[in-house]
Amino acid sequence: MLQSRIYTFLVGFTHCVFFQVSCSSSEFSLDGDYLLGGLFPVHEVVQSTIMLSPEAVECKRHIFSRSGYQMLQVMRFAVEEINNSTNLLPNVSLGYEIFDHCSETKNFPSVFNLISEKGLLKPKEKLNSHQPKIIALTGPYGSTRTLTVAPLVTMDLIPWVQYGAGSDQLNDKLQYPTFIRTIPSNKDLIQMIIRIIQWFGWNWVAFLGGPDNYSEDGLRLFYEYTRNTGICLAYQDIIRIGGNHNQTLKNINMLNINVVVIFALTVYAENILKAAIANNVRDKVWIASQTWSMSPQLPREPGIQKIGKVIGITERLLSLPGFDKFIYKLKATTDKDNNSNALVQGNVFNQECNECPSLTAKEIINENPTFSFAIYAAIYTIAHALHKVLQCDANECRKNTTFKPYMLLGEMKKLEFPLNGRTVKYDINGNPTVSYAVVQWHTETNPPRTEMVGTYDTYPEITFSINNSLMPWRNNTFVPFSNCSVECREGYSRKQEGFHACCFQCKKCPQNTYVDYSRDPYTCYPCAESEWSDEGSTTCKIRSVVYLQFTEITSIVVIFFTSCLITLLIFIFCLFAFNYNTPVVRSAGGNMCFLMLASLTMSSISVFFFFGPPTSADCILRDFIFSFFFTICLSCLTVRSFQIVCVFKMAAEFPKLHSLWVKHNGQWLFILFSSFLHFISCVLWATVSPDHPVRDSITFNDQTMLICERRNTVTISIVLFISWFLGFLCISFSYIGRDLPKSYNEAKPITFSLLMYYLSWISYFTMYLTFQSKYVLLLNALAQITSIYGILLSYFIPKSYIMLFQPKKNTAAYFQTSIQNYTQTLSRS
């Protein structure tokens, strides 16, 4: 309904005479079996005026465009080439109806002419009943003009093969179901511009566009595709005819932007570049969109070489074989017939060109060739689709085949054919494969020229490259700088300043962190627990896992001495058992000696839990076993020291106390009480926040130490206090009994063994608190072995030596003599 109203409204203000023109120009129309429609900007309305009533524009009254006239000739050339071919459409001739399309909103009569049937428009006609004048359309030039006429063309499902509209909106197949284009969309163009910017490491750019859909679409896509790329759009503006370009250029200089993208039609690009010349803008890099990159006039502007370097994007294939010959032939014919005015015949609406006859063949050939291949490919696409629909073979086509224009669409979408060394094919949205070239202007030469310096292709795979050796700054030490901030050195993260992400300060990443520029240059990521890094790192290194291994030399030595110790203890245990009834064993404590030796043997076993990766059981048993059984031994030594003092010195002074001690086996009660008390403290230590294995990645950057963490200092303090207090009592009693008979005097051996005990553990705790290494654990094991060896060497070895090598001293008579000598000494004193 809405579309019908559009038709009715536009027909209402359009005169029927527009569709009843009997005369036509030889260049604008050609009869044929099937007609193609063409819309080209032979003239351009530079600045439209606001009309109070609907009015169609007469293009011949506006500015002549040589580029648009060249486009028209490319279509004519393609049609003539197809008609002369014996393979594509053997017995079929193509004709065309071409109109000058110079305005964005006032060229509807031309479109009505093309979609009409015998000069009539029937908005309510069923689709299958309507046969428009043309079977397919190409043009007009420009996205805004295309979007303006789109509802009229797509209503009748006329195949629309566009050569000059890149807007991404046209990919919407619900609104534009018949739209196919032979130039890449703005999406591809913007993506290539971004690749150029990234190639040279720029991130601080300006984007200038015209007041049209083409530039608006390009800006939207530029915003979308630069997200998360590190590129910042520092400035954007719209170039208008007669606008304040001086302020635009002043803003660009003020922001220190050295790369400017001009995504606009030629007329707007020309305005801003002329303003840049007038304002003495220097040393910028101007990135030209496809529309003006091959403009033949702009590189010739006086002073253009001073504003900097121009890098443009254009189609790879620009020249068409045979086109030059076609133009020379055309001009030879028209020049011959010029006097008869055969070229332009009367007042044909928007099919007139008064300036065209005066152009030379060279002027036409040298015009901007950017869209030549796109137009050429558009006509060939229609011809190949028609070839399929008419079921053509090598000799003829079935001309009597009845079809509607929309039937060509299905064949167009399936096409894939070679054309001048390129493969023409379309994706699901009707977009072609991309084959772009990066060109640079050489404005310093006379005449100016362009040089291809890079390529971008999407078929058969995406490839992009620029030959840096061809760039204008190849002999300099650096590429032109256009960044908000200087790039951070390796190992430094960015700290954003202000609104733009590419404006930042650099911050060195601390230890055990790294910056991954491909992931996020603004974050120092922590290394994993099993990794480490120095300050200012971009990667993490694997930590070496450190613990006391059984195979290390130091571990083997400790294990060897521990094994010897256990063997020696067992040997002495057997020796004492064999000499159980001798005075030496009796004086050493009798049965108590066996408890001491058994306790020392069990204490020695704890050393084996220091080697290998620690487990929870290792962390508990390595100290629990030693502490408990060694404390039993200390309890025995304490009782032994007290008993000797009690017999020789306290029995006479405190007979009742001595009697009670002997009667109730005070020595065993003391050992049982102290051992039980210590056992309870050890159990508390092992159950209330016990030591547990941890991976220490803090002490050393490059190492992960497998250690046992002490979590409860209170319980371990109680355990140590009991052991050390017993040792203190033992030394005290030994000191009191230092003048006892030699055979019973244990002061020196006990004092020596306990001094070794205290010194070894003081050394260990000192190293534990001041030095961090896996060998601190080795010192812990050594402290345990030293404590055991101290008692063994000072207390048991001398007695074993007597039993083995001095049996005379292991007699009752020898001990009696010793006691008598002690009594005589006391009586003299």
Image: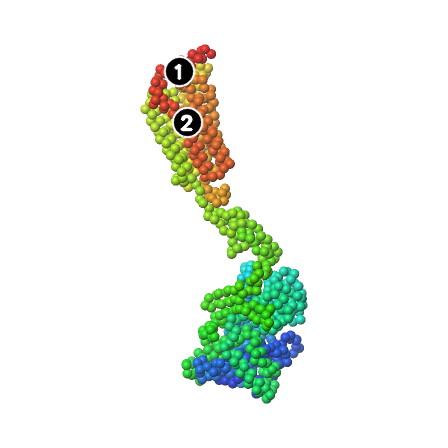
Task: Judge whether 135 appears above or below 596 on screen.
Answer: below
Amino acid type, label 2: Ile
Image location (x, y in percent) of residue 796: 38, 25
The residue labelled by disc 2 is 791
Coloration mode: rainbow
| Callout count | 2
Amino acid type, label 1: Ser
Query: Which numbered tag is attached to residue 100?
Result: none
Residue furthest to the bottom: 340
Image location (x, y in percent) of residue 612: 40, 40
> Answer yes or no: do the residues labelled 1 and 2 have beta carbons within 8 Å?
no
Task: Judge whether 821 appears above or below 438 on screen.
Answer: above
Query: Tag 1's secondary structure?
Result: helix
- Tell me the CA gap for discs 1 and 2: 24 Å
User: Is residue 259 something that shows in the picture?
Assistant: yes
Residue nearer the viewer, 762 or 553: 553
Query: Tag 2's secondary structure?
Result: helix
Image location (x, y in percent) of residue 788: 41, 29
Quarter of the image for the N terminus: give it: bottom right
Task: Judge whether 232 appears above or below 106 on screen.
Answer: above
Left or right, 268 with reference to 698: right
Residue nearer the viewer, 167 or 333: 333
The residue labelled by disc 1 is 818
Count neighbours of disc 2 (C-alpha within 10 A) and say few if under 14, some if 14 to 19, many if 20 or more: many
